[in-house]
Image: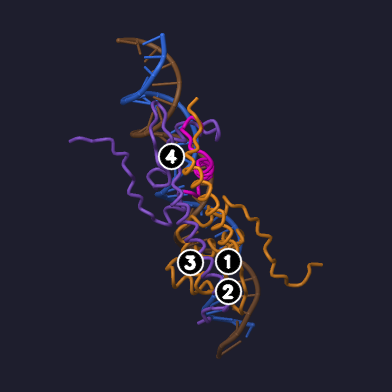
Chain colours: A purple, B orange, C brown, D blue
Amino acid sequence: MMMSAKTEVTPVPPDGAELIRVLADPLRFEVVTLLARETLCTTHLVEETGARQTNLSNHLRVLREAGVVDTEPCGRFTYYRLRPEVLTSLAGAFAELAETARETAATDRKRPCP
Amino acid sequence: MMMSAKTEVTPVPPDGAELIRVLADPLRFEVVTLLARETLCTTHLVEETGARQTNLSNHLRVLREAGVVDTEPCGRFTYYRLRPEVLTSLAGAFAELAETARETAATDRKRPCP
DNA sequence: GGCTGGTGTCAGCCTCGGGTGATGTGACAG
DNA sequence: CTGTCACATCACCCGAGGCTGACACCAGCC
């Protein structure tokens, strides 16, 4: 069958808990921070983070499978681009949780001791 | 010598990366979700999550040391209350990161291949 | 063609951290 | 005072996952 140039648009299963787990790793979070400011390829990330290429490639796969980043091949290089929507939804989830917590604190809602 | 029974207002070292790591654990995140809706004590959390008391106590210590929750002793019980500010700041951080990423994507800002 | 440089994949090592059981302590009930 | 309950702390086990080295792959350059 033909493959065409599908970039495999990534189905992006937006699992909240899984997403947090992915972002919890220090190196992955550093990569995300760097990619937020600039679209980079693996070589740049190696320079910036000081991590081994193999190590970074593994982490980038995790980020890719989690739908956090998109890849854009450019000759021998591979550009990594961050997906803002993912971070936005995460921020929204935390904001909503914080709002609920603030209401709970304001009305002093607590379950009685049994 | 020591001054009164201060509840030890928790210095709260607001380390972003550390905070994410703390919230990345499924059980801890479930606890945070539950505490957002209602102030509970350990017994309630044991009932709700189905986890062992020891296990929960350990996780609650992590949440306490990270400044995510506050404790309020009530007789033999200990109430756990969520700190909305922590979640708010985290949400803000992610929103800011998302904003930066959106700008980067909009202006197609990328570092050239060396 | 062969060679080099940029990346992904695989298999293994090894540490970190979550789960558990035993045990201690303080607070009520009797 | 003694028992029980709520909760914390400790010591230990063990598996998930991060890191690495060896290798495969592909795209340009000679």
Tell me, yes or no, whether dots 1 and 4 are on the same chain. Answer: no
Disc 4 marks which residue? A60
Q: Residues within 10 Å of mark 2 (few under 14, many from 20)?
A: some
Q: Could you give the CA–CA distance between mark 1 and mark 3, rounded to whole angstroms?
A: 11 Å
Q: Residue furthest right?
A: B1
Residue found farthest to the front:
B107
Measured from the top left, where is residue D17 in percent x and y? 44, 45
- What amino acid does circle 4 point to? Leu
Could you give the CA–CA distance between mark 1 and mark 2, rounded to whole angstroms?
8 Å
Q: Main secondary structure of the magenta part?
A: helix
- Callout 1, which amino acid? Pro
Q: Are marks 1 and 3 on the same chain?
A: yes
Q: Is residue A106 one of those drawn in magenta? A: no
Q: Chain of mark 1?
A: B
* Alpha-carbon span between mark 1 and mark 4: 32 Å
Marks 3, 4 in one chain: no
Q: Amino acid at mark 2?
A: Ala
Which chain hosts label 4? A
> Where is mark 1, residue-wise?
B84
Dot 1 or dot 3, earlier in sequence? 3
Q: Residue at x 76, y 72 (%)?
A: B4
Name the residue carrying label 2.
A105
Q: Residue at x 82, y 67 (%)?
A: B1
| Label ID, residue B16 | none
Q: Position of residue A33 (x, y in %)?
A: 53, 44
Label 2 chain ID = A
Amino acid on which the number 3 mark rests in the picture: Thr
* Circle 1/circle 4 CB separation < 8 Å: no
Q: Residues within 10 Å of mark 4 (few under 14, many from 20)?
A: many
Chain letter for mark 3, please: B
Alpha carbon distance from label 2 to label 3:
14 Å
